[in-house]
Image (spheres, rainbow, N blue to C red):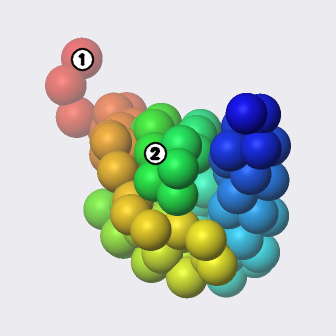
Amino acid sequence: MGTSNVDDKQLAKDVRAALRRGKRSGYSFSNIRVRAKSGVVSLTGAVPAQTDVDAATRVTQAVPGVTAVDNRMTVHVPMNRYGGQ
């Protein structure tokens, strides 16, 4: 029935809340999209550093109900305005 869909929505909401709390610790989680299905949480989006990717995985794994994390986030390093053109 529809209970897993509601649970998935609640789990995604819980993960987003945990990521917002993690953002206060100095990590950049603004551009992360969260989806949950049967306890598996998928993270997508771009962040400025690999430490943000790793921290998002740790924060997500700590949320009750998360059974696995599929982290497909990418690191997007802003171009250096002094190098290149």
* 14 displayed left or right of 83: right
Taking the image as shown, residue 65 lies to the left or right of residue 6, namely left
Query: Which residue is drawn at the image coordinates 64% and 78% (left, top)?
Result: 64
Q: Nearer the viewer, mark 1 or mark 2?
A: 2
Give, as a three-letter code, the residue at label 1.
Gln
Among the 4 quarters of the image, the one containing residue 58: bottom left
Mark 2: few, some, or many residues within 10 Å (few <14, many ≥20)?
Answer: many
Is there any visible trace of residue 49 in the rendered image? Answer: no
Q: Badge 1, how many Cα within 10 Å: few under 14, some, many 20+?
A: few
Question: Which disc number belongs to residue 85?
Answer: 1
**x and y percent of residue 37 in the render?**
53, 43
* Quadrant that contains the N terminus: top right
Q: Residue furthest left?
A: 84
- Say which of 74 and 5 sits in front: 5
Quick check: 64 above or below 66? below
Q: Position of residue 61 (x, y in %)?
A: 48, 75
| First of labels 1, 2 by sequence position | 2
Any mark on residue 42, and which? 2
